[in-house]
Image (tube, helix red, strand yellow):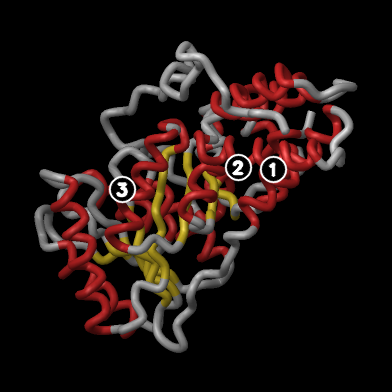
Amino acid sequence: MINWFKRTQKETTPTDIKTDTPPKKPLFDELPDIETKEETLKVSKTTIFSRLKQRLSKTRQHFGQSIGQLLLGKKSLDQTLFDELEISLLQADLGIEVTKTILDDLSQKVARKSLADGDAVFAVLKTHLQTMLAKNTKPMLTPIKGPQVILMVGVNGAGKTTTIGKLACQYQQQGKRVMLAAGDTFRAAAVEQLKVWGARNQIPVIAQHAGADSASVLFDALQAASARNMDILIADTAGRLHTQTNLMEELKKIKRVLQKMDSSAPHEVMLVLDASIGQNALFQAREFHEAVGVTGITMTKLDGTAKGGILFAIANELAIPFRYIGIGENIEDLRIFEPQQFVEAIFND
């Protein structure tokens, strides 16, 4: 059996690997030109898959194409080939655990002589990655009665408030009655940003003054959403307090307060992560999941980074479903996540 992980002390580790530097964050939290509902969901000249493939080009070039160049057409399998495959997987931000899992699986298949060449390895690798993402798929919880409460969490700069606006517009396009709650009372810009989304698209926004108690705002919003027979309440939350502990305690408090009115709320705790930060996104996911029980993830900014492999690391360790991916500034660029399509877009030339 091949020893996949024997290395010298000068081996390449994840911290040694050069990856793309995240773009400098703007002073104002990525407020794009706000679209009206008449401007949403424009028919593209390209197919949905072609657009996805185009927007994931950096990850495809850094990950999919490098793997393809390494494996496709190789008639024999040797230690050097798999050493290079290991490095490629680590460079793509899959992380040590996912890389080890994949290589262990391949080693077993090689030992059984079920893999004859590089093309076979490439096909098995794609299937393994698709399965890793697909096994976590599960629908959002829907209440028997009353509004579905989606609690959005995540650090500042990940695109949380923008994601809320896009998601609200998409639900509205589906005929849903949507309300927004401006729960990030520590950042005046976030409140104003939600108000702009609401005003441009005729979506009601429940907000209070800057510095107001976030849990109180969200409780009032749930009362209002119930009284007005709303289908969905999407609640923004703070992304930064004085310490990380304070932030997590604030989110726990919000959940307790919401449950006083609806014991099943929030029905979805959606974590918004910035793909460009790579392995740090996994660290954030761990912390939020431990504190508030994340039930879904939206991964933003995938169009601007080569670090799309981080989705596999998160899926493997935390088994949290990915709900949406962000691949651009337009409302329709917030896409429902489809595991098979995502993997195909990365590995399709």
Residue at horizontal 68%, vertical 31%? 54
Q: Position of residue 289 (x, y in %)?
A: 35, 57
| Res 118 → quadrant | top right
In this rendering, does residue 42 appear at all?
Answer: yes
Front residue (pair 151, 92): 92
Front residue (pair 286, 50): 286
Is 316 placed left or right of 207 in the picture?
A: right
Q: Are marks 2 and 1 in contact (CB under 8 Å)?
A: yes
Label 3 amino acid? Gln
Q: Which residue is mark 2?
A: 101
| 68 versus 158 height, above or below | above
Residue at horizontal 40%, vertical 73%? 267
Quadrant showing the C terminus: top right
| Res 199 → quadrant | bottom left
Q: Which residue is mark 1?
A: 105
Q: How far, Cα to Cα, is label 2 from label 1?
A: 6 Å
Q: Nearer the viewer, mark 1 or mark 3?
A: 1
Q: How far, Cα to Cα, is label 3 from label 2?
A: 43 Å
| 186 versus 274 height, above or below | below
Circle 1: element type? helix
Residue at horizontal 41%, vertical 44%? 273
Q: Which residue is mark 3?
A: 193
In this rendering, does residue 330 appear at all?
Answer: no
Front residue (pair 187, 59): 59
Circle 3: element type? helix
